[in-house]
Structure formats: C-alpha cells, structure tokens
Image (cartoon, rainbow, N blue to C red):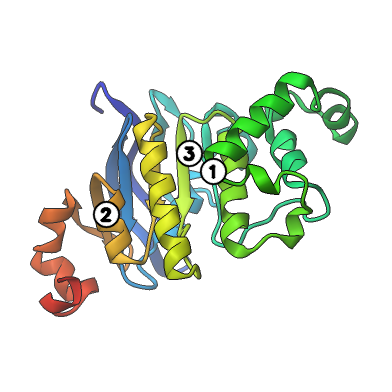
Amino acid sequence: MTANSILSVRNLQKHFGGLKAIDTVSFEVNKGETLGVIGPNGAGKTTLFNTICGVYEPTAGEVLLGTQAIHGLKPHQIARLGVARTFQISHPFRDMTVLDNVIMAMGGSHYTGLKGIFSISRTHDNISKAEALLAKLHILAQRDKRAGDLSLGYMRRLEIARALALEPKLLLLDEPCAGLSHDATQEFIDIISQLKATGTTIMLVEHNMAIAMTVCDRLVVLNYGVKIAEGPPAAIKNNTLVIEAYLGRDDDIA
C-alpha cells in the first residue's frame, strides 16, 4: 500500500460455483485520481464493484479502505465508512422531488428509520447543501421536479448528487454514460472532469473506451476476471494483450 492509497484490492477472488468471475485481482486507487476499470462484456467489471461494495462477499483476498479492512462488511457499513457508488440502473425515490432525494442521502449514518429521516433531514443547512450539490451537477433547475419524471441523463446526475451527499472518500461510478446521447455523454465527461478538479477520488467502470481514455488517469483492464494490464491510457491503448482481448484492431481505438 502506498501512502497516497485510498483503496487497496489485494488478490481478490469471487467465484460462483466453478466460475471465477474475479480471479486474484490486485490494484490500488490513489487519493485524487480517477481510476477506470475496463474490459469486454463478461470481464467481471461489475462483479468487482459489487465485491468491493459488499454486495458479494469475496471468495478470497482483501479490500482495504485506507488501512481498514472492509471485505465481508455489509453495503451500508461500507457506505458509512466512505465508499459511495452509483448503478447502471438508477433507483431514486421516484415519487419524491429531486431536492428531497438528495436531502434523504445526507446524514445517512445517523438515521435509524423513516421517522428519523423525516424528523432531522430537512434542515436549512441540508437544503442549502443539497442545492449546492444539484448546482454542481447542473440540475438545480430540476430541484422541485418528481425524480421519476427526469430524463435518463438527469437521473444519472441525481444518482451522483445523492452519492456525493454521503461525503465519500471514494466515489464509484458504474457505467455512468451507458445509454446516453452523444451530447449528454459529453456533458457527463465535463461533469466528471469538474469533480476531478475538486479533488474527488473516482473509480469507474466504463465500456466506452473513448470516455475511459478521456477521463481516467489510470486504467485497470480485466478479461475473464483476470487483470491483464494496468497503467495510463496511452500505455493501455498500445498494449497488445488489451488490443487482442478488448479493443480488437488498432484502428478501433484510433
């Protein structure tokens, strides 16, 4: 582990019967960087995220947040320690307003039930903080809309706003641009760049290579659950194993 490490994954394995979905994978995420996890369909990217976040218990290996072991903990315990994530399919409180969705995420470590949420969450300070997050994600104009009425692009932004409301040490984004239009994707790239500029530490799964190459400082490449490469985008782009496993021909990434 380096002194700058936020997350350390050590020899992580996740097996489903005879299937080795994650096979002895190791890497670190450093403070302030954006690390991308890429690979072809079925490479194990989302399984890796789910194992880090506690959805799956690892078959073997370790996951450390700083110096604290988090493997084997429940998802809500890991979130309270500072790991927030978004999902490919957004799950907001659809009948609540955009603003209230963000407020609900604040102080989650103090809530003991729905009564507690509604009794302490809607303070003046939390409203101001929620509005600031919505402004940061460029959806403040949607604050009073029902979350279920948002477009896909705005819903993805709301997911990030809710994750940031937890004040995480590490933000995990699972294919945040999947299904978005070209213009919405470009706007999302700008948002991620702005988050990076404010020092947010990000780990993201992204199937679109152009996006990953643009926003990530470093890339980890998986193929059939095995890490086959790790390094800066320029090195990954020219890695023969990566080209053969995921990128195909050289002109696919030109």
- Quick check: 105 above or below 222? above
* Residue where numbered disc 3 is placed: 71
Answer with left or right where residue 251 lies relative to residue 181. Answer: left
* Residue shown at the point (87%, 31%) measured from the top left: 118
**Label 3 to label 2: alpha-carbon separation:** 31 Å
Residue kind at label 2, given as amino acid type: Thr
Q: Picture coordinates of residue 33 (x, y %)?
A: 30, 36
Residue 214 numbered tag: 2
Q: Describe the element under mark 2 as helix, strand or loop.
A: helix
Residue kind at label 1, given as amino acid type: Leu
- Towards the viewer: 32 or 152: 152
**Label 3 to label 1: alpha-carbon separation:** 31 Å
* Residue where numbered disc 1 is placed: 137
Q: Describe the element under mark 3 as helix, strand or loop.
A: loop
N-terminal-most mark, 2 or 1: 1
Q: Picture coordinates of residue 30 (x, y %)?
A: 29, 32
Residue kind at label 3, given as amino acid type: His
Which one is in front in this view, the residue at disc 3 or the one at disc 2?
2
* Residue shown at the point (69%, 36%) measured from the top left: 105
Q: Picture coordinates of residue 199 (x, y %)?
A: 37, 29
Q: Picture coordinates of residue 156 (x, y %)?
A: 57, 55
**Label 2 to label 1: alpha-carbon separation:** 19 Å
Which one is in front in this view, the residue at disc 2 or the one at disc 1?
1
